[in-house]
Image (cartoon, grey):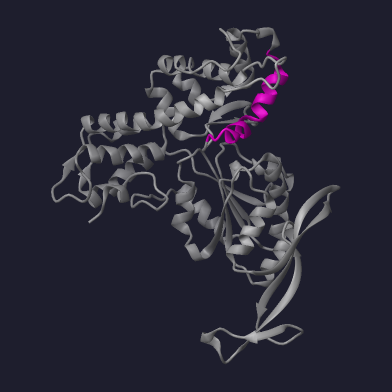
Amino acid sequence: MKFTNQVYGVSNELVDTYIERTAVDETFTKGLQKNKHIIVYGASKQGKTSLTNKHLHENEYVKVNCSPTSTTLDIYNSIARQLDIEILETHEVTTNVGGEAKVGLKAKIRIPFWGGGDAETEASIKTEKEKAKSFRVIDYNLALAQDLSELLKNVKFNKRIILENFHYLSEEIQKQLAIDLRIFEDYNILFIVLGIWREKNRLAQFNGDLLDRVIEVPVEPWERDDLKKIVAEGRPLLNTSFENVVDYVIDSCFDSVGVFQEICKESCYAANVHGTNRNLVEITKENVDLAIQKKLEDYSSRHTRCLESFIEQKARSSQEIPLYIPYYFIKVLFKETIENVIQGLRRKPLQDKIKEVHHRPADVRASDMGYFLKNLVASQISKGISPPIFDYDNSTSSIKIIDSTFYFFIKNCNRNEVFENFALPEGLEE
């Protein structure tokens, strides 16, 4: 007996309809066999976490969930803590790295080993009474990649380190980690970085030494045949068939496997399928339409709140009159065809279109657009928009959608009605 939410849907657990794709899964598994870091990237809900869950057991990795406030010290401290490394005492120190003062954490760490030497000895745990466990006490600076690498080598660390939600980190921390990854590689301490972006060589932009030293695994695109394999896998598990509607579902999800999985799940619920059926159930177009409506309601609630936060902008002083670029960007975006939105909005045409509708067109300069684009992800994260909806792709000079559910929302919502309900940013009159 299988439950519907075990077979279809978006979940932290691996769903039973996970399918392997040669270009993705094979690249990832080959990367695990090589002494290289692995970068897994793509839009949200496109299978990055599922990929690692499929090919790695929990005892094969240490995972750190990054947040907007995380520092390299927080990340490295988390790694040490998860390995049950005993930290006897700590104090802050300032170290010069590349001419910059870095605050670190000097720690006295007790490392176990079996043997003699100048170590302190204590009784072993009950299961090994006949042995004596020895310890070495060593000073480490847990903010330095080299010190952490030496520590991990001392405890014979042989797992992968997964950095989840790497895109949440500030650009400064991303740059530092890109530099540190090169140091970790020298010690064969290998990371798997999961991030929401769509451009190649994102980390190599921060550190050119990473070119050819990392394996990049883009989880997109999802082909139609891939999505059809998902419902083929699900058919015997629930005894349900999507044969007559699978193309209709695919057309509605914009190549997002997350949206596809959710529509399949809600279509089953609409057909009163909550688990494995005794008799075959054919999913109908009416079932799918109800599922689409349900997901539109779910996504609309979230995206409307996010866009309200995104366009909100307050003057920093009574004399300042902002340009409200985020507001005008959304205004232009909502007028674009879905084809243009999927393709991405290029910087220069976007600036021209904003000037056409702006209340002070002459003041919208290239530098203003540059500032807006450079801080695009950071400003969303600071406003609690998680995952971010938009990202700027330097390689194509265009804004890309990186929340795969947003395509579904903007295609199916009443754009005029949604935009009219947005409050004008404080101080703006049109």
The image quadrant of residue 141 is bottom right
Quarter of the picture holding the N terminus: bottom left
Q: Position of residue 143 (x, y in %)?
A: 73, 56
36 lies above or below 302:
below
228 lies above or below 340:
below
Between 121 and 290, the residue placed more toward the observer is 121
Between 124 and 282, the residue placed more toward the observer is 124
295 with respect to 69 (left or right): left
Q: Is residue 377 magenta?
A: yes
Q: Residue at x 59, y 12 (%)?
A: 428
Magenta highlight range:
364-385
243 lies above or below 422:
below
Residue projecting furthest to the bottom = 130
Q: Is residue 139 magenta?
A: no
Q: Position of residue 156 (x, y in %)?
A: 64, 72
Q: Position of residue 155 (x, y in %)?
A: 65, 72
Between 288 and 30, the residue placed more toward the observer is 288
